[in-house]
Image (cartoon, rainbow, N blue to C red):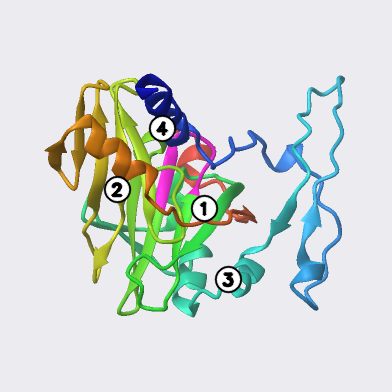
Amino acid sequence: MRKRILAMLLAALMLSNMNACHQVTNDDIQEGTTNNSSVAEDLSTNNTQNNSENNEIAPIQEPTYTTQILVEVLRLSSTFLMALTNEQQIKDVVNDSLTYLNNFIVGSIAYAYVSALDLDENGVNDVLVLECGDKVIVLKEHEGKVYAWQFRHTALYNIKVDGTYSWSDQAGKVYGTDKLQFDGYKKNPIELYRVEYNEKFYINEVEVTEETFLAYVQNQEFAEIATQYWWKTDFETPDYQMNGK
């Protein structure tokens, strides 16, 4: 019974809700006609078919939002709109520098998944960007500025609307659940629980018995996973990439 519960817990923690990004470029996707008269009409469905002659990859069909409509759908502020369209620089908190989102993410990303989260429960939505690859970007607005944090996918996944998320380390031998919180623009995550090598168990960073841990996890009420929106960024490849630098 113990092994079964632990196995189920590990599977739940390791199963990412963030679907693998489609490795596509502008040449891989032919978008449907859109109409800016309404949010619903501005969605486009990718209809590219497999082409053996030019090795094009057919992406999974799903609605694709332009930046303007994405901001409206997620009820984001005008500050986020300027950041998402590269009209305003963002603060890379880790490196203590200013840059544009285009360069901060990857430089030439054309499509990404985006979710809206209220990480400090102040009624203002923050933004989570999952790019194609192993990178998750958290964008948070504070006093008219947008701050950015970068995570590895395994360090922040299955993120839910209340900011709780799963993480794993050491090839899945250490794993747990934290809650991402902020004090202004200062990141203040809280560890809810973790397991180390299926031998040591912690709740709120305090070691507990296996029985206490299993009872705690089984009685947890988990929030809903944050909805993801497929975003067409309209980013352009910067000069340094075009010149091969």
Q: Earlier in the sequence, mark 2 or mark 4?
A: 4
Instruction: Measure the alpha-carbon separation of dots 4 and 3.
Output: 35 Å
Of label 3 and label 1, which has the lower sequence position? 3
Q: Residue at 50% across / 33% down in the picture?
A: 15
- Asked if the stretch drawn in magenta spans residue 31, the answer is no
- Which residue does the numbered mark 3 point to in the structure image? 71
Left or right? Give the position of 193 relative to 42.
Answer: left
Which numbered marker is on residue 40?
none
Disc sitting over residue 9 in the figure: 4
Which mark sits nearer the N-terminus, 4 or 3?
Answer: 4
Q: Are marks 1 and 2 in contact (CB under 8 Å)?
A: no
Q: Position of residue 165 (x, y in %)?
A: 38, 47
CA–CA distance in space, label 4 to label 1: 16 Å
Secondary structure beneath disc 3? helix
| Amino acid carrying mark 2 in the image | Asp
The residue tagged with tag 2: helix, strand or loop? strand
User: Which residue bears the numbered disc 1?
Assistant: 225
> Mark 3 or mark 2, which is nearer to you?
2
The quadrant the N terminus occupies is: top left
Earlier in the chain: of badge 3 and badge 2, it is 3
Q: Which residues are magenta?
A: 130-137
Q: Amino acid at mark 4?
A: Leu
The mark closer to the camera, 2 or 4, is 4
Q: Quadrant of residue 245?
A: top left
Q: Are marks 3 and 1 in contact (CB under 8 Å)?
A: no
Q: List the residue tagged with mark 2.
A: 178
Q: Which residue is at the front of the view, 206 or 173? A: 206
Q: Is residue 87 above or below residue 99?
A: below
**First reached walking from the N terminus: tag 1 or tag 2:** 2
